[in-house]
Amino acid sequence: MTWLRNVLVDLADESPQVDLAERTIATHDRRRRTVLSLLAAGMVVVIAFGLTATVRLLPDGPQEAASRGDLPARGVGPLSHAYKTFCKPDKGKAPKDCRDGGWRVVTRSGKAYYVTEALPSLSPGRSGLRDSPLAISRDGRKIAYYSAKEGTFQVRDLASGQKTTAADKVPQGWLGSISRLMLSDDGRFVAFSKVPDLKDPALLIDMRDRVVRQLPNRWVPIGLSQDGATITLAEYSPNSQLRTISNLWPSSSAGNSTSVILPKHYRFSPLAPDGKTVAVIEDLSTAEKPCRYGDLALMDTLTGKRRKATAFSGLSPEVSQISLRTWLSAEEVTALTMSVQCRPASKVPDDEPAVIDPPYRTMTAYAVNVRTGKARKIATYRAQDFFQIVLPGPPGAL
């Protein structure tokens, strides 16, 4: 994989470094997944977002043992999560029945299936790199993904097997190096955004009425109103920002947009159940003092006003990285955590090679009360890094 290393940049000045076997922050995944789009564009896009890392989630042993091969045509129960598999980690073993770049979904009962219809993120023989997003509805009963056969996005009801395909084609080149997909609760709307943005728009697709609304690119869709008329977006580079666009339909309208540029760097949760707030964690990391994060707080998405921050309690003292994910209730949000050994940038040799596929590490998910900061452990997983785990509901802003 030296061809990959030769075209990629060193991010030591822009993001904290961790030990070679544990470089699970943004540097690794950007280096791996930007090659095709960056070669085509003749450029390297660097997206600095502190310690927010990327995840390829592997279930614990019992779930892995329950692998059932390909996703059945129908009769699949609600999902707990989905994850990508990459099969040549730098150290250790790949998951059983590994398929390079393939999407695997796991039901709440622990049955794991590969979504063969979804475009793999890695070409056979590792001859090409791309991103291929997947989303899960909040109830876990529907998925959205980029269909390799149809050349566009598709929504699938897991119980009935019914598939709904977007009316407009979406070229694979539009998928970018880092992409985001959000599926509405009822499966009607699919929101897609990616980086690098180039000239391709982000999209909000009405799968029922078969119409498309263009959205600003680079913004991560983190919430959508029930009628699809208002979307909440987040951005993390070069500044942390929140944006709300309402009056989205008809698609010919300009919509009403409100943006807030924040004075500090934050990690955002998906939109809260109240439809107007997000949970945030201030990123306190620097190149020389990595793996530092602030307390938990709630923030108004329209004004950027942050409520009083609350210290975490109940997390493992070894936690060094946190990614906010699915809301479990109006009071609790999921915090996916990882413990890595961090090093200041000055301690990382200039000629230290990039780790293309880091080893799988243990990750722990907590349910955190946003009022009190109290955390309770809910699950433990094996993963390479934070980016490609998908939980039900809108994604957080990595």
Image (cartoon, rainbow, N blue to C red):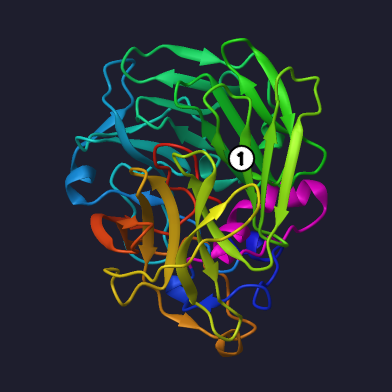
Quarter containing the C terminus: bottom right
Query: Vertical placement of 227 versus 380: above or below?
Result: above
Look at mark 1 in the image and give the residue it sits on: 232
Q: Nearer the viewer, residue 211 or 340?
A: 211
Q: Nearer the viewer, residue 131 or 246?
A: 246
Quarter containing the N terminus: bottom right
Query: Vertical placement of 9 versus 150: above or below?
Result: below
Specify the quadrant of the image occupied by residue 75.
top left
Instruction: Report x, y in % for residue 124.
Output: 52, 39
Q: Residue furthest bottom?
A: 347
Q: Residue at x 19, y 35 (%)?
A: 109
Asked whether residue 23 is drawn in magenta, I would say: no
Query: Vertical placement of 314 versus 348: above or below?
Result: above
Look at the image and tell me whether residue 148 can be seen: no
Side of 202 where 121 appears, left or right: left
Instruction: Report x, y in % for residue 252.
Output: 80, 19
Specify the quadrant of the image occupied by residue 71.
top left
Instruction: Report x, y in % for residue 375.
Output: 28, 62
Q: Nearer the viewer, residue 306 or 203?
A: 306
Q: Residue at x 56, y 11 (%)?
A: 208
Q: Which residues are magenta?
A: 24-49
Side of 300 where 374 appears, left or right: left
Look at the image and tell me whether residue 215 can be seen: yes
Q: Amino acid at mark 1?
A: Thr
Side of 199 where 366 appears, left or right: left
Instruction: Report x, y in % for residue 106.
Output: 30, 37
Circle 1 packing at 10 Å, graded few (<14), some (14-19), many (20+), is many
Q: Residue at x 33, y 12 (%)?
A: 160
Asked whether residue 40 is drawn in magenta, I would say: yes
